């Protein structure tokens, strides 16, 4: 019987590698991808029928549009903020509200999932518990605000204090009926310890002239939830005022005049003109509504020497 010489390791390895070249390889057919954060939520302990809610972010993290096909949730939980079928463009994201809605006491788990035609499904693990615990209260102070007249396009800020009662309160929602009124320095969800309070900035930025109002609604696991407070204000248009100045000509041989303006009597003053004014009048259109200004002038001779300042003139700019 004829025996073949034993192959070297190098030859054997070559044969193996050659064989691998013919194996089928599965390659993904698309570059769509989506992510969701956070990937788990624990709602903690809540009163029955008074579960809190969280916002999660679904993002297109791939290089092509994601075709969303379905969104599902299980357990004692509900969702809002996403519709299917729909699409999510490259780099885009949406906020989805996941609410815990326990109808009985006990511990609960669930899963929220989003599926797509061309991307891997993403999910969030949900958990929470419900007991017959008494509810605390949440108060907003003051309960109404007046911003008065605010120039259109500018922002005025006041402070509202939110205080918890005898037990901790979790604030999980804040809405306004008027987009010209907003809240800042409030991160949701946030917990206020029993008997403690937090300060929240309330802003008014009128987009047009006229009186307006808004109502803020604060949702929390409190007995009096939702808590509400109101705000009023008026937008006023900016008016362009002009101050016209005239003076008696100097009796000396002069080549021009300088005009100075200050915001306090006696100065300091700032020169308003670039080159010397050859007439005996000047218009100042850089004034602001509601401000008071003080003006003086000087004369300049042919050698460039400037005279002493004239008597001061005061003018108050109307509002608006």
Image: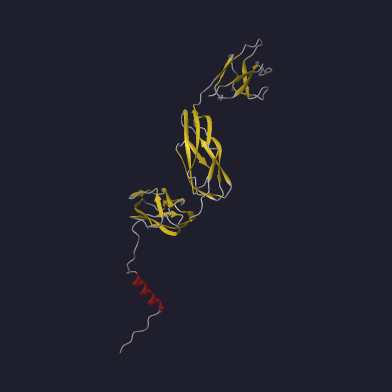
> 191 or 64, which is in the foreground?
191
Place residue 279 in its image quadrant. Answer: top right
Q: Is residue 162 toward the left or the right of residue 126 in the image?
A: right
Residue found at the very far left of the displayed protein: 1
Q: Is residue 216 above or below residue 314?
A: below
The N terminus lies in quadrant: bottom left
The image position of residue 122, as x and y in percent, is 40, 57
In the rendered image, residue 25, in percent from the top left (x then y), is placed at 34, 65
Total marks in image: 0
Q: How is the image coloured?
A: secondary structure
Q: Position of residue 149 (x, y in %)?
A: 52, 28
Relative depth, front residue between 5 and 153:
153
Residue sticking out furthest to the top? 251
Residue 290 shown left or right of residue 7 in the figure: right
Residue 255, quarter of the rendered image: top right
Residue 284 lies, in percent from the top left, at: 56, 21
């Amino acid at each position: 019987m004829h025996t073949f010489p034993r192959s070297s390791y190098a030859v054997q390895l070559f044969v193996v590698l050659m064989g691998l070249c013919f194996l089928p390889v599965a390659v993904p057919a698309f570059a769509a991808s989506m992510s969701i954060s956070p990937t788990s939520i624990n709602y903690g302990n809540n009163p029955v029928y008074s579960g809190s809610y969280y916002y999660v972010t679904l993002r297109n993290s791939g290089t092509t549009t994601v075709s969303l096909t379905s969104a599902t949730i299980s357990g004692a939980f509900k969702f809002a903020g996403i519709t299917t079928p729909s699409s999510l463009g490259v780099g885009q994201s949406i906020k989805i509200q996941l609410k815990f809605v326990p109808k009985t006491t006990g511990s609960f788990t669930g899963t929220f999932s989003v599926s797509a035609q061309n991307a891997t499904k993403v999910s969030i693990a949900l958990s929470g518990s419900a007991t017959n615990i008494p509810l605390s209260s949440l108060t907003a102070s003051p309960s109404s605000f007046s911003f008065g007249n605010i120039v259109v396009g500018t922002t005025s800020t006041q402070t509202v204090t939110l205080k918890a009662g005898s037990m901790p309160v979790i604030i999980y929602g804040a809405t306004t009926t008027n987009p010209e009124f907003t809240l800042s320095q409030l991160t949701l969800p946030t917990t206020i310890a029993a008997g403690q309070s937090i300060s929240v900035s309330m802003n008014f930025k009128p987009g047009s002239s006229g009186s307006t109002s808004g109502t803020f609604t604060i949702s929390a696991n409190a007995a009096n939830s939702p808590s509400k407070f109101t705000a009023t204000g008026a937008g006023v248009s900016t008016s362009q005022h002009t101050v016209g100045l005239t003076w008696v000509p100097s009796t000396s041989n002069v080549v021009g005049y300088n005009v100075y303006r200050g915001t306090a009597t006696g100065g300091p003053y700032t020169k308003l003109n670039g080159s010397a004014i050859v007439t005996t009048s000047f218009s100042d259109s850089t004034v602001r509504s509601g401000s008071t200004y003080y003006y003086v002038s000087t004369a300049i001779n042919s050698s460039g020497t400037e005279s002493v300042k004239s008597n001061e003139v005061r003018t108050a700019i109307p509002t608006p």
